[in-house]
Amino acid sequence: MDEKEIKVLNDIGRNFMKCPVWDEALRSDQDKKLPQPELYHEAAPDSEVISLPQNFEELDLNENLFSLLRSRKSRRIYSEEALSLLELSFLLWSAQGVKGRRGKRYATLRTVPSGGARHGFECYVDVVRVTGMEPGIYHYLAGSHALELRSRQTEEDRLQAVEGQKWAVRAPATFYFSAVLYRFEWRYSIHAHRIALVDLGHIGENLYLAAEALK
Amino acid sequence: MDEKEIKVLNDIGRNFMKCPVWDEALRSDQDKKLPQPELYHEAAPDSEVISLPQNFEELDLNENLFSLLRSRKSRRIYSEEALSLLELSFLLWSAQGVKGRRGKRYATLRTVPSGGARHGFECYVDVVRVTGMEPGIYHYLAGSHALELRSRQTEEDRLQAVEGQKWAVRAPATFYFSAVLYRFEWRYSIHAHRIALVDLGHIGENLYLAAEALK
């Protein structure tokens, strides 16, 4: 890539940030009353579903927001201990947990904020060391706070998924988020993509603070 | 805007999300050892600087993370009460507070995470009802946890800034974030803009939780 190509791509990025087009007449698919996409993926047929415990009051959490904000930092060295299923459940709930609904199927209200309550992400967990669970990639079923096994991974798959960063494969569990963009686009049309990225930050910070709260 | 134009812009957004170009040979300005941008804006010459209190332990906070995650929601109705200076200080600290440094001027470590610790945002507060403060737009001086008055606003200015959303101008204080993109680009080159938007989400969620913690 030469300097000129870099400049072009950098300008695309900058323009994207600036929301360069604002057209009052723009009508989203929601405005056009087109059918709404599903609020979250359901379990695949025949998949093995693991219900997650929600007795979070039994976790010995460091729950004090002030001290969490003070102590939170990126940690890239992991103990060899396993997470408990309840701890994993708490992390998933903090990142994507459904706590209410609007209308029959208009929106979910979650532990994490989302522009227009669109919640366009699906969460996957690469489980390595969680007590009582087989290692593998699990899909989080937000609608029922459960997990379904999707695939098994070799050490090589796992390393490739994190771009070869060896410290990252040593974590007891790794969270991946996949954007279902039409959930954002249905409401926000061409403005959806900025909103999706900001939402990803909301999720990341909740996950960060919840992980910090686990002792 | 016709359907074809919308499709083009939507595809630009989708491609932007996908990080379509990954060139191992790409060298950022940091790789090229070009001078690093400032970590945060300093106060303007002659500006009036207000130091912010940090005795946060005196705030009667609802600090329990679990209950904060459960109760947090978008609130668009505000009481007519003023915020105290200590409350405003806590919100600013939660969103952008500096808690450490790496090297002499390589990076700040803050209450909020940022990709590569670039922290490319500047924070401005539109103060309407904060005890002891004159209304106006203040710039947050992250380096010294202080505020400087930048400008005064009419009711009309304020309404225009929030795109005419009347509920929003009734808040005792409104936070604005301005991206200084080169702080991200210096390290991340053409990938900077996605990272900046995710960082904005980190900030938003900290601010959300800190506001929820104020009683």
Image (cartoon, coloured by chain):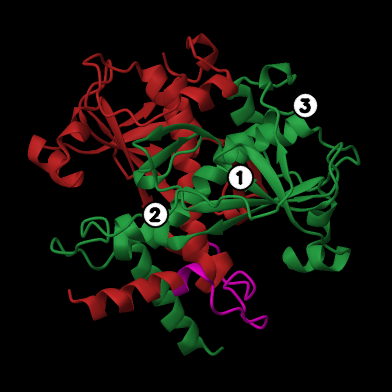
Chain colours: A red, B green
Q: What separation in Å lies between label 3 and label 1 (alpha carbons)?
A: 26 Å
Mark 2 belongs to which subunit? B
Decide which of B34, A2 is in the foreground and name it: B34
Image point 58% across, 23% down: which residue? A65
Report x, y in % for residue B24. Answer: 14, 60
On screen, residue A170 versus residue B113, left or right, reads left
Residue B58: which disc?
Answer: none
Residue B122 included in the magenta stretch of the image: no
Report x, y in % for residue A154. Answer: 9, 37
Q: What separation in Å lies between label 2 and label 3 (alpha carbons)?
A: 33 Å
Graded by Cα atoms within 10 Å as few (under 14), some (14 to 19) or many (20 or more), the crowding at tag 1 reads many
Image point 21% across, 26% down: which residue? A128
Identify the magenta region: A15-39
Q: Do the residues under discs 1 and 2 have CB atoms within 8 angstroms?
A: no
Image point 63% across, 43% down: which residue? A101
* Mark 3: amino acid: Lys
Report x, y in % for residue A203. Answer: 47, 42
Residue A34 included in the magenta stretch of the image: yes
Decide which of A166, A122 is in the foreground and name it: A166
- Please determine whether, in this image, residue B214 is positioned above or below residue B9: above
Between discs 1 and 2, the one toward the N terminus: 1
Helix, strand or loop at mark 2: helix
Report x, y in % for residue A38. Answer: 49, 55
- Judging by the rendered image, the residue that carries numbered circle 2 is B195
- Judging by the rendered image, the residue that carries numbered circle 1 is B141
On screen, residue A27 versus residue A51, left or right, reads right
Graded by Cα atoms within 10 Å as few (under 14), some (14 to 19) or many (20 or more), the crowding at tag 2 reads some
Mark 1 belongs to which subunit? B
Between discs 3 and 1, the one toward the N terminus: 1
Mark 3 belongs to which subunit? B
Residue B215: which disc?
Answer: 3
On screen, residue B183 versus residue A164, left or right, reads right
